[in-house]
Image (cartoon, helix red, strand yellow):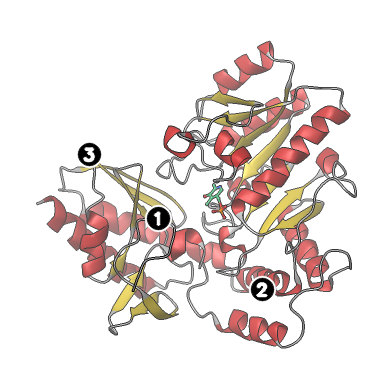
Amino acid sequence: MPDHLVHAYQSLPVSFTHGDGCYLWDNAGKQYFDALCGISVTNLGHNYPPLTAAIQEQAATLLHTSNLYSISWQQKLADLLCRSAGMDRVFFANSGAEANEAAIKLARLYGHQHDIDNPHIVVMQHGFHGRTMATLSATGSRKVQAGFEPLVSGFLRAPYDDIDAIEAIAANNRNVVAILVEPVQGEAGIVIPGRGYLQALRRICDQQNWLLMLDEVQTGMARSGKLFACQHEAVVPDVMTLAKALGNGVPVGACLCSGVAADVFQPGKHGSTFGGNPLASRAAFTVLESMLEHSIADNAAQRGQQLYDALRQGLAGNQQVAGIRHLGLLLAVEMKSPCQELVSRALQQGLLINVTAEKVIRLLPPLIIDEKQTAQLADRLVDCINHFTL
Ligand SMILES: *Cc1c(COP(=O)(O)O)cnc(C)c1O
């Protein structure tokens, strides 16, 4: 068949026909353990029955009306999200990049409303916020930015997990209006900051009247062992963005805002045709409701610890392993040398994993994984990594 797709992706030579829970099957009938979840999207596993039922019912009732009318599922979802996060309002988008675009626009508007004519947002080295022009400009990776200059201005970059650097910016710059940061850097290789980092950022933002904007697109929705990663430090941000697992595969993004940030957007300032449509809203509502009802975050914390312990033990003698780290089921095995090849090796053995930042094996298994499946996954991973390096 002629190839009519833009060559934006280097796809692996496998195509899946269906999935169930932690497993996927390809068109030859081979079974795979999905330890990636479409990059932390299908956190409740594949073909999650309550979600399937909700989508089916909504598809047979009403798909779309536009934001020119009020949408009851959007209101219900906003209510549950805000109560869960301890925040005030939500703007719905369709992806992580779009949710971050909303956050960036909100921060600029907030600046102008406070007579800062050239508002700047502090972003981090190696941070990732998406592929649209503003979000790739906020992203701290030359690979993402190269070839797309001129970039969007108005971003100031600081090293991650470095409070002194933020204090220095606060002392020297009058144009900053916000910090945009991931609670754990995902694409950078599951980089977990030291304890108290978010609390220190919260304190500086309060002192400076900056907005603390957390990109929880990858860390949110129970992945880290709490519903939102900022809850590990009892920090409530002014703005928080979500997407990926919010719809468990149905595209939906959200920009939550609170306090002074909650009333920045007024009619005419932002919008989206699809954002928060009845199908996406009902799907996300069902996902969140299920996560709360079944204490999915607690399971992520417990299984994350189990997987981490098993990997530590199984890989203890492997000289090629530089380190293992995790927060809930956001887990990384960092190797001493590039290991991209491991992805296709694991694929052959029926295991879906990812390598990011060249040397980091990134594991994002489903949060519904049970104890036995976790033990099996650990065994298979240890086997795969040890065979690869020996
Ligand atoms: C994936 C990701 C994004 C981008 O989300 P898209 O839905 O691909 O636009 C933004 N921020 C973080 C932290 C991500 O992991």
Residue at screen point 57% across, 29% down:
150
Residue at screen point 50% across, 66% down:
299
Q: Is residue 369 above or below residue 256?
A: below
Q: In the rendered view, does 80 fall on the left or right side of 291? A: right
User: Mark 1 is on which residue type?
Assistant: His
For the residues labelled 2 and 3, say whether their Cβ atoms are less than 8 Å apart: no
Q: Secondary structure at mark 2?
A: helix
Toward the top, the furthest residue is: 172
Task: Say whether disc 1 or disc 2 marks the residue closer to the N-terminus.
Answer: 1
Toward the left, the furthest residue is: 390
In which image quadrant can residue 245 be found?
Answer: bottom right
Q: Position of residue 163 (x, y in %)?
A: 56, 23
Residue 336: image tag: 3
Residue 283: image tag: 2
Residue 148: image tag: none
For the residues labelled 1 and 3, say whether their Cβ atoms are less than 8 Å apart: no
Residue 301 can be seen in this image: no
Measured Cα–Cα span from mark 1 to mark 2:
31 Å
For the residues labelled 1 and 2, say whether their Cβ atoms are less than 8 Å apart: no
Q: Secondary structure at mark 1?
A: loop
Residue 7: image tag: 1
User: Mark 2 is on which residue type?
Assistant: Ala
Tell which tag, 1 or 3, sits nearer the viewer. Answer: 1
Q: Is residue 211 above or below residue 17?
A: above
